[in-house]
Image: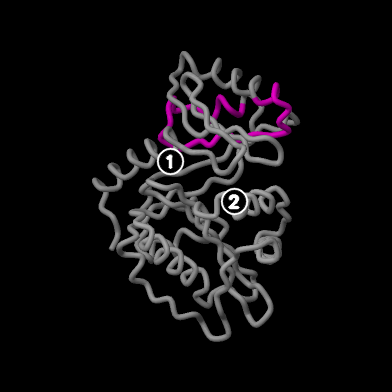
Amino acid sequence: MTIDLDELLKVRARFDAEAREGAQADAPPASVERAGAVVRHVAPEPGWNSVLWSDLDEGTADAEIAAQVAFFTGRGCPEFEWKLYDYDRPADLGDRLRAAGFVPEPPETLMVGLVSELAKLPVEPPEGITLRVVTDEAGVDLMMRVHTGAFGRERPRLREQVLGKLREEPETIAAVLAMAGDTPVSAARMEMQPGLAFAGLWGGGTVPEWRGRGIYRLLVAHRARLAAELGIDYLQVDASDDSRPILERLGFGVLGVTVPYMWTGNAS
């Protein structure tokens, strides 16, 4: 069952309040700071640094962008992200970020689904596939192997982030592999915080030769059932163009479009 428009607007407001303005750190020793008109995620290397939420207008945006560049570069961060949503103010915030040296990555669709409905999806694996829960370093290495095959690049920083969560805050992450015999062919994770209505679905990727067999859908259904057991109301996804049609068929609704704007200090 797809969420209707009026409900989506309410859900979006709740998402902004809980997951952006009220965000929690992804893992120790990271922290979330409210600095005037922005909320930012701050972590030592190799952690993730980002502006998560802002409340700006035409008169304050440029100065705030400069202040965040100064803050993160002053900490020695080699890069950081400004997580922009298409309904953020001012309307030209993306143009202002580009003018300040940020580089946009490909846009993704912010989608949300009702756990109570998604948990009803069938979870019978396709022929030849079994699920393996990731709990240790060996499992994380298999996930990274899948991500390299599915997305075409290695992500050592993500490896350390997932390992950190499994070791220090295992209650905030659920990671799973789809295995064809001893070969990992798909991987995904769910990240959540105690007491929040939203859990994020991340990293869903399948190696090319195993696509089109229902594995992505299986991993969504698996995580939805875990979310239901934990009392989580909604699953949130930053969906690629490949994932969006699948998620829409499963009942996810669109809240907006999000673009990661990256600062590396190397943009011209």
Q: Of the residues shown, which amino acid type is indicated by label 2?
A: Lys
Compare marks 1 and 2 and give the one earlier in the sequence: 1
Residue 240 visible within the image = no
Q: Which amino acid type is shown beneath numbered disc 1? A: Ala
**Measured along the vertical axis of the image, is residue 118 above or below residue 155?**
below
**Where residue 42 sits in the image (x, y, percent)?**
60, 32
Q: Position of residue 101 (x, y in %)?
A: 66, 27
Membership of 109 in magenta stretch = no
Q: Is residue 260 left or right of residue 224?
A: right
Between the residue at mark 1 and the residue at mark 2, the CA separation in whole angstroms equals 18 Å
In the image, residue 26 above or below residue 174: above
Q: Position of residue 108 (x, y in %)?
A: 51, 48
Give the total number of marks visible in the rendering: 2
| Residue 76 within the magenta-colored segment of the rendering | yes
Q: Secondary structure at mark 2?
A: helix
| Quarter of the image where one finds residue 118 | bottom left
- Is 262 in front, or is 53? 53
The foreground one among 202 and 248 is: 202
Q: Is residue 118 left or right of residue 82?
A: left
Per the rendering, the mark at residue 165 is 2
For the rendered model, the colour scheme is one colour
State the residue lying farthest toward the bottom: 127
Of residue 174 and residue 90, the one placed in the foreground of this image is: 174
For the N terminus, the quadrant is bottom left
Residue 19: mark in rendering: 1
Please give the label number shown on residue 206. none
Q: Which residues are magenta?
A: 72-98
* Label 1 crowd (10 A; few <14 / some 14-19 / many >=20): many
The local secondary structure at tag 1 comes to helix
Q: Is residue 253 above or below residue 185?
A: above
